[in-house]
Amino acid sequence: MKISLPQLKKHLSGGLSAVYFVAGDEPLLAAEALDAIRKAARADGYEDREVFVPGTGFDWDSIRSSAGNMSLFASRRIVEVRLPTGKPGRTGGPMLADLAENPPPDTMLIIIAEQFDSAVAKAKWVARVSDAGTAVIIKPIALEQLPGWIEKDFHRHKLSFEPEVIQLLTHRVEGNLLAARQEVDKLALLADDGHVSVELATQSVSDGARFDVFQLSDAAHSPDSRRAIRILYGLRAEGVAAPLVLWALAREATTLVSVWQAVDEGQSSGLAMKQARVWGPRQQLIPACLRRHSRESVESLLTLAAMADRVVKGAKRGEPWDALLELLLAIGQPADGMQGQLSA
């Protein structure tokens, strides 16, 4: 059975599973889920806990042996298996699935996948474990959901606040829930009267935003150039290599050119995006971006990408991050619109 994090509280109040699979790339939310499961388990008599973190050369039979010996102890026990990459390998996957389908008595098995990409999600062992127990799939907090999440965290501390405070924190900690939690906790200590003003938040909140190149890819298509630029230079400040950023932006430029050319030849935008491997929310981003382009601006993207490539690789004089900025702005802020060639 698969449930979301918001559904976990209700699930735990109705009785515990013998097997839990907690998966997701957001450490704070995964930790909250695990804390809730462990708390409910302790209340139900699971007093001992043993943790395994498999690595290279790990003896998977040690988990089976440990779980099989649980009945020798007076109390119930938890066996936790943490998978840093989410991939237990050819030996570990089937073993975990077998153990989940036949758990020893008085034993709770908790499997944690700290990374959960599409390959892990489609693995056979994940399907077997999910069917045998309860899978809690942690989904990242989207940007539009972040203000609501921060507001709930303020309510957790019973704090009152000015509306602008939520906007300030959202801007400062975008992409980093742990930083958001830490900032709210800090403000709770600083707000002697239980009220957080804009002045207090401005003085105390550090810039904890954390970005990746995939966020930059989506932001590149947006008309909000300020956010795109902020992400670009946030990546630079975090030490992300310029070639990796170039790869992301060049891919977006190539995608725009590919979709434009296909539509120009008479294909529907839906088919054009499918052939260009554009999925999910990007199916709204790409057409909206192209409607701001002209033929000339689209065709210039590959030239700018090639120039940026030469600068980044040192084959042409220039500042790599300036070249990346020029390409970024050319993707999302062309001079002329394409006047409705693509449907919404």
Image (cartoon, grey):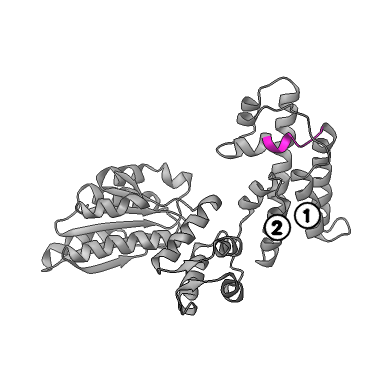
In the rendered structure, the answer to whether residue 176 lies left or right of residue 262 reads: left
Q: Look at label 2 and name its amino acid.
A: Leu
Q: Residue at x 36, y 42 (%)?
A: 124
Q: Which mark is residue 325?
A: 1
Q: Residue at x 46, y 44 (%)?
A: 119
Quarter of the image for residue 289 reads top right
Q: Do tag 2 and tag 1 residues touch (Cβ < 8 Å)?
A: yes
In the rendered structure, the answer to whether residue 296 lies left or right of residue 74 reads: right
Point out the stretch of residues depicted in magenta: 288-294
Sort mark 1 into few (<14), some (14-19) or many (20+) by Cα contacts within 10 Å. Answer: some
Q: Look at label 1 and name its amino acid.
A: Leu
Q: Residue at x 74, y 41 (%)?
A: 253
Q: CA distance from mark 2 to mark 1?
A: 8 Å
Q: Is residue 99 above or below residue 70?
A: above
2 or 1: tag closer to the N-terminus: 2
Percent position of residue 339, x then y = 78, 29
Disc 2 secondary structure class: helix
According to the image, label 2 marks what residue?
232
- Which one is nearer the viewer's eye here, 15 or 47? 15
Q: Quadrant of the N terminus?
A: top left
Percent position of residue 22, x then y = 35, 54
Q: Is residue 279 visible?
A: yes
Q: Is residue 294 above or below residue 56?
A: above
Reply yes or no: does residue 41 show up in magenta.
Answer: no
In the rendered structure, the answer to whether residue 42 lies left or right of residue 72 reads: right
Disc 1 secondary structure class: helix
Q: Residue at x 15, y 59 (%)?
A: 106
Q: Quadrant of the C terminus?
A: top right
Q: Is residue 54 visible?
A: no
Q: Is residue 151 above or below residue 278?
A: below
Sort mark 2 into few (<14), some (14-19) or many (20+) by Cα contacts within 10 Å. Answer: many
In the rendered structure, the answer to whether residue 60 lies left or right of residue 190 reads: left
